[in-house]
Image (cartoon, rainbow, N blue to C red):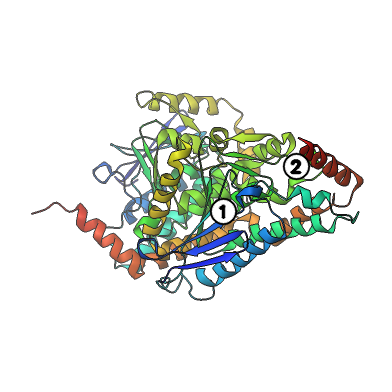
Amino acid sequence: MKAERHALGPVTLEVHDGALAGLATITLADPDRRNTMGPPMFDGLEASILHLEARTGASRFNPLQEAPPSDVVRVIRVRGLGPAFCAGFDLGLLADDPDPAQPLLASFLKRLAGCMRRLRALPAVSVAVVHGPALAGGCGLVVACDVAIGCPASRLGYPVHAIGLSPAVSGVMLATRVGAGATRRMFESGEILDGETAHQIGLLQRFAPTADALGAHADALVAELLAKGPRALAATKRWLQQLDPSIDPKAGADALAASLGGVGSPESRTMLRQVWESRRKS
Amino acid sequence: MSDLVTLRNEDGILTLSLQRPEARNALSLDLIEALERAVTAVAADASARVLILRGEGKAFCAGMDLRGVLHDATRMGQMLHGLARTSLAIRRLAIPAIACVHGAAIGGGCGLMVTCDLAITHPESKCGYPEVDLGICPAVVAPLLIRRIGAGQARAMLLAGGVVSGTEAHRLGLATHLASERDLASTTMELAHKLRSGGANALATTKRWLGDLEPELNEEIMRRAADLSARIIQGEEAQSRLKARFDAAKPAH
């Protein structure tokens, strides 16, 4: 397998070779903006996922029949460059949208839902490496991955009621990770959980004792996954996909519709603008 | 009852013991068949109020015993389908089932652990699913594990899994209770007595209701799971990894 590197705007997609053959890395690489999600970030994520849909090979092999070809991507690492994993939607763009119907916000929610669904459905095993804040849509990306690894500096949560938004779009996948009770707690309180708490409730499944050790722990996890039986791994992922209620398109559509319900409301427009103004001043 | 399992009834508290200590209660076809018959007997026993499932010897259950059946697709299929049927039968008992897990619950053994309504273990035990390391697809376990810890959590456990300590198994929800190794048996018995003191009809109604909430956990899904697992084990990947594991475990001459 030959190494590849694709610069997709603020996202870098690498397909590794040598000892890491079988691994691809999606890096959110807009550190100055804390990897917030705006049109370029969504473009980059969608292009990465599209590329990986071809490279993970749902169309190229069936684990029921055969082992994956050697050039298939089996493990996907998702990480963020800079201080944050991903700080959620770009509020500046949303606050400045002059259209009262907020079409930009609607498109962000739809694109987030699409990225989460497609990421989760990839035939490879996905690992989110959460070194810092993963908020709102950023936390959505984390729960869409099969495994999340973090450290004490991880920060996860949905502080979005404060800007007049509903985090429902993440709800179905979050609930399969932490249960319905903890989902209510996180959604309604809007609290940002520290790494230890997120690990305790199962939002992070692996945990490095310090931020400095996270990279090495994540590398070890990736190596473990690459060493597993490729056919068994693909067959297991496919089976889990069939059993997972959060993959149900109707559940996903309902969750998205709930978040879209508030788009264009006076509450959403006013709160977004207020929060953004106060941030701009401070 | 065969020698491979024993079933004891003490005032409605039924203790079903796996009796293959020399193999850490690894699930051979004979053991699975004996277990299935015993569970059928439990279901038919009107005096039964609580079931405790335990293993004799050093470990609760070391998983499927694949030694000697690697090339026997028929036998392998019988084992997986037998385990799938037995799991569903335990799930559908009208009485609560407690897994008393000491030592280890690995692979199919950890499947039995999460099939029971309650599971108690001790901090030093080893629990988990190393299947994919060996090229095996833990398909039969998956529908049961999903109902214990959620589909998102089950992804991490089965795909990236491996074996964890009893303490971690408790944190993850594989075990519902934790006791010291010394107190494991007595704590399990206390739990059983507490469950027995509840109204038998109320408990049976509750179990039926909980069963009604998981209609997808049915014969068809368990059959498909067993077929899938059998198919992957017959592949070259699983065969070569398992052979290497067995060869490494053989004493050197």
- The type of residue carrying mark 2 is Val
Q: Earlier in the sequence, mark 1 or mark 2?
A: 1
Is A191 drawn above or below residue A126 in the view shown?
Answer: above
Quote the CA–CA distance across marks 1 and 2: 21 Å
Q: Is residue A179 left or right of residue A276?
A: left
Q: Which residue is mark 2?
A: A160
Residue at x 64%, y 55% (from the top left corner): A245
Q: Position of residue B227 (x, y in %)?
A: 46, 65
Residue at x 59%, y 27% (from the top left corner): B198
Quarter placement of the C terminus of chain B: bottom left
For the residue pair A96 and A159, the one nearer the viewer reads as A96
Q: Is disc 1 surrounded by few (<14), some (14 to 19) or many (20+) residues within 10 Å?
A: many
Q: Position of residue B82 (x, y in %)?
A: 42, 57
The chain ID associated with circle 1 is A
Q: Which residue is mark 1?
A: A145
Q: Secondary structure at mark 1?
A: loop
Q: Quadrant of residue B138?
A: bottom left
Q: Residue furthest bottom?
A: A60
- The type of residue carrying mark 1 is Cys
